[in-house]
Image (cartoon, rainbow, N blue to C red):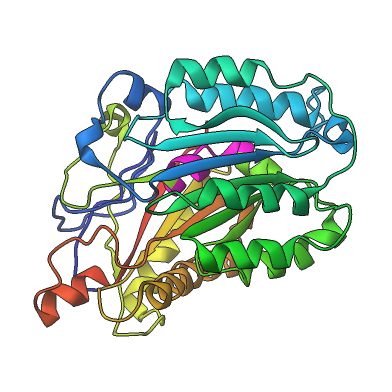
Amino acid sequence: MNVKSPILTAALVGLLGSFVVSPLFAVEIITRDDIVNNVVKKDQLVKVADNAILLLDTSSSSNDEFDSTGKSIVQSMKDELKARNAYLPDLGYNMGIYTYTGWTEVYPLQPYNRDKVAAALDTLPAKGSGPTPLRSGLQKLENILKPLSGRTAVFVFWDGEYTGPNPAETARNLAHKYDACFYVISSAKPERQATLAHDVSTLNACSRVISLADFFNRPDYTSGALFDVKATEHVVTSTDTKVVGLKVDNINFATNKTELVAEDKADLDKVVAFMKDKPKSYAVVAGYTDNVGSRDHNEGLSKSRAEMVARYLKERGIEDSRMVLFWYGPNNPLVANDTAENKAKNRRVELAVGLGE
């Protein structure tokens, strides 16, 4: 553990210890107010995707009630997307929004415009109908991906069911042909979820499954897929003034390694103690690498590092639903990868904790 870096929280009360710190870090829990009030400025953020595409499930299963809220899945999805659009920082993305239960161009791919996206989301149906033809939707997606440059984050809302052939192979081909990360927002039944998670994990290193409940409860899943705080920026959010003093070191790793050392475990034990004391709190865990090796290798390695930290927390009683994981590979280094010492600093996991209230 070589780099000292503060973990700043969204609304944190409690002291987990005193550490020597530097202003260099990347992971922050940024709230709506931080964006709306311009506390966190656009030039302090770095894009981790150039394009964002939403494929929305408006099949008949989307009429099911969401999580005992009294609202249907389709209405909850519409409301949550509208809420997040209201404060998404415009970093120059291209965005497209489509329904694939009866293909509809809700917001054809174009530069992101907050007001136009809001108006487009208003046109989503209040009630779902029909089957779930995800494979045909993915086939249409290919023509949208073809002309794009840079990385594309594809958010696929899906009930886990499908009409016709399994769409996994189609998605895998798209992931390999284009620089696309698939974020599958799943309302699948529990017995289907494990198979779905395995299928998506084989697409590429950056694709994943997120349960619908976790996605709705943690806006971080949207922001973290699209942007990160520049590691060279010292961002002080509006809620940092409420921080009493949670400061934990970055967790650093040897080349191509994922093991935690005793000092890391001691720090994580303090995080566990805090989170058990604050049962609504949650952790954002992000893995990074140096620039040695291919991007795909490094994204997989940074994923393994983030998962190692999450596994340690889980084994000590922190539920999966209270952890949000990201892995960025060599993106957003703390320092230039120009010496062995600096590369060691960039091989890291950063962790932030928010109260979730």
Residue at figure coordinates x 44%, y 44% from the top left: 51
Q: Is residue 140 left or right of residue 247?
A: right
In the rendered image, residue 40, in percent from the top left (x then y), is placed at 26, 31
In the rendered image, residue 267, in percent from the top left (x then y), is placed at 36, 65
Residue at figure coordinates x 76%, y 29% from the top left: 74
**Is residue 181 depicted above or below 11 in this figure?**
below
**Is residue 120 depicted above or below 111 in this figure?**
above
**Is residue 71 depicted above or below 259 in this figure?**
above
Residue at figure coordinates x 34%, y 26% from the top left: 35
Q: Is residue 257 magenta?
A: no
Can residue 236 be spotted in the picture?
Answer: no
In the rendered image, residue 112, in percent from the top left (x then y), is placed at 42, 29
Q: Nearer the viewer, residue 210 or 48?
A: 48
Position of the N terminus by quadrant: bottom left
Q: Is residue 31 left or right of residue 40?
A: right
Q: Nearer the viewer, residue 104 or 20?
A: 104
Farthest residue to the left: give it: 339
> How many tags in the picture?
0
Can residue 67 be spotted in the picture?
Answer: yes
Highlighted magenta segment, given as a residue range: 216-225
Q: Nearer the viewer, residue 318 or 326?
A: 326
Q: Is residue 304 left or right of residue 290?
A: right
- Main SS of the magenta segment? helix
Residue at figure coordinates x 18%, y 75% from the top left: 343
In the rendered image, residue 221, in percent from the top left (x then y), is placed at 52, 45
Q: Quadrant of residue 328?
A: bottom left
**Is residue 287 depicted above or below 237 in this figure?**
below
